[in-house]
């Protein structure tokens, strides 16, 4: 847990089955879809199957960030290639712009490295999403390069597990 006098008590916990609906609603937030590499809305049945497979996967770690007991963000680490895990995160609309994206990365990155037995983390951010680019930079990630992913211009950030 982390205490921030301006925001309340922050706590990170593993995702549980009961988080399925809130994660689906966050995934379909118009801003989240717009910053995603796949902008289409996600039907609940598709999300449900995906969520169940991620929850059971040994190649994925997922966490929820809570503020005073209420879920305000999620982060997922997926084995990307040998020894490297890819990060995906989002913060609920009402809490964006308060540094919670940086905090959720800082609060979970070492744990994810250990759980997934990886030596490096990578994040891909659409070049137009400057807010998320700043999140990775503030969390100590290095901008490696600008690249194309799924036909879209993006920035690649990495962090070496310690």
Image: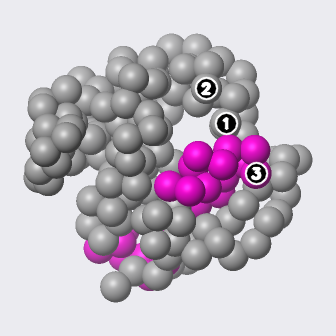
Cα gap from disc 3 to disc 1, whole angstroms: 9 Å
Dot 1 alpha-carbon crowd within 10 angstroms: few under 14, some 14 to 19, many 20 or more: some
Dot 2 alpha-carbon crowd within 10 angstroms: few under 14, some 14 to 19, many 20 or more: few
Q: Point out the stretch of residues depicted in magenta.
A: 113-135
Membership of 114 in magenta stretch: yes
Q: Residue at x 39, y 80 (%)?
A: 161
Per the rendering, the mark at residue 51 is none
Query: Disc 2 designates what residue?
Result: 31
Per the rendering, the mark at residue 127 is 3
Cα gap from disc 2 to disc 3, whole angstroms: 15 Å
- Relative to residue 68, is residue 65 drawn left or right? right
Q: Residue at x 49, y 75 (%)?
A: 159
Query: Disc 1 designates what residue?
Result: 35
Which SS class for mark 1? helix
Q: Residue at x 14, y 38 (%)?
A: 8
Cα gap from disc 1 to disc 2, whole angstroms: 6 Å
Which SS class for mark 3? loop
Residue 37 pos. (x, y %) = 72, 40
Q: Are discs 1 and 2 less than 8 Å apart at CB?
A: yes
* Residue 22 seen by the camera: yes
Residue 107 pos. (x, y %) = 27, 59
């Amino acid at each position: 847990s982390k205490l921030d006098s301006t925001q309340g008590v922050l706590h990170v916990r593993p995702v549980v089955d009961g988080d399925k609906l809130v994660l689906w609603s966050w995934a379909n937030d118009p801003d989240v879809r717009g910053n995603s590499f796949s902008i289409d809305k996600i039907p609940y049945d598709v999300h449900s199957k995906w969520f169940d497979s991620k929850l059971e996967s040994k190649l994925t770690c997922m966490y929820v960030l809570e503020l005073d007991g209420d879920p305000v963000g999620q982060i997922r680490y997926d084995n990307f290639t040998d020894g490297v895990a890819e990060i995906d995160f989002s913060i609920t609309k009402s809490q964006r712009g308060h540094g919670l994206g940086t905090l959720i990365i800082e609060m979970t990155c070492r744990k994810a490295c250990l759980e997934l037995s990886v030596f490096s983390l990578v994040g891909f951010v659409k070049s137009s999403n400057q807010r998320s680019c700043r999140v990775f930079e503030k969390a100590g990630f290095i901008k490696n390069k600008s690249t194309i992913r799924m036909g879209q211009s993006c920035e690649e950030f990495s962090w070496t597990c310690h």
